[in-house]
Image (spheres, rainbow, N blue to C red):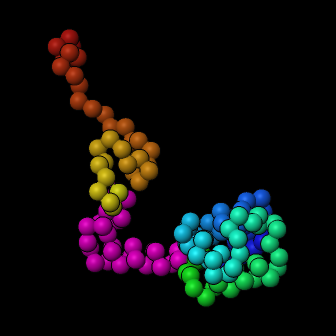
Amino acid sequence: MPRIAGVDIPNDKQIEYSLRYIYGVGPHVSLLILKEAGIEPNVKAKDLTEDEVATIAGVIDRNYQVEGVARRAVSACIARLRDIGCYRGLRHRRGLPCRGQKTRSNARTRKGPKKTVAGKKGVKELSRG
């Protein structure tokens, strides 16, 4: 398995898709990296030579924030939002969606598993008992 930016990328996939296993590299950036390195996107990762892997690693190191640096940048941006007390920062602090989604029935990804709350007794139960 080739190792680029501290990540083992899968052998059996095309290099265009294998590069996406690196945090901070998506579909568009992956193609830009390969274009700058002069490598065909449809070549399998296991078929790359050491020089080609080194070229890709050099392009990523020079031009892109990936892995730890990118994670720190994202967490610093979220910390800034929390510190200034803006709406998005408050939503991050409370663990709720930040981009306008409804939370009455969905948002389970952000809110976590359901916590059942005891409801009021129904009108039928009160009349019987």
Q: Quadrant of residue 52?
A: bottom right
Q: Is residue 13 left or right of residue 124?
A: right
Quarter of the image where the C terminus is located: top left
Q: Main secondary structure of the magenta part?
A: helix
Q: Quadrant of residue 128?
A: top left
Question: Residue at the spot x=41%, y=41% of the render?
Answer: 114
Residue 85 pos. (x, y %):
26, 73
**18 or 113: nearer the viewer:** 18
Say if the magenta span includes residue 85: yes
Q: Is residue 128 left or right of residue 80?
A: left
In this rendering, does residue 90 appear at all? Answer: yes
Quarter of the image where the N terminus is located: bottom right
Height in image: 66 above or below 15?
below
**89 or 102: nearer the viewer:** 102
Question: Residue at the spot x=29%, y=57% of the render?
Answer: 100
Most extreme residue toward the bottom, as rendered? Answer: 62
Q: Which residues are magenta?
A: 69-96
Question: Residue at the spot x=65%, y=62% of the render?
Answer: 17
Residue 78 pos. (x, y %):
39, 73
Residue 13 pos. (x, y %):
73, 59
Q: Is residue 127 left or right of residue 74?
A: left
Question: Residue at the spot x=69%, y=79% of the render?
Answer: 38
Residue 16 pos. (x, y %):
66, 66
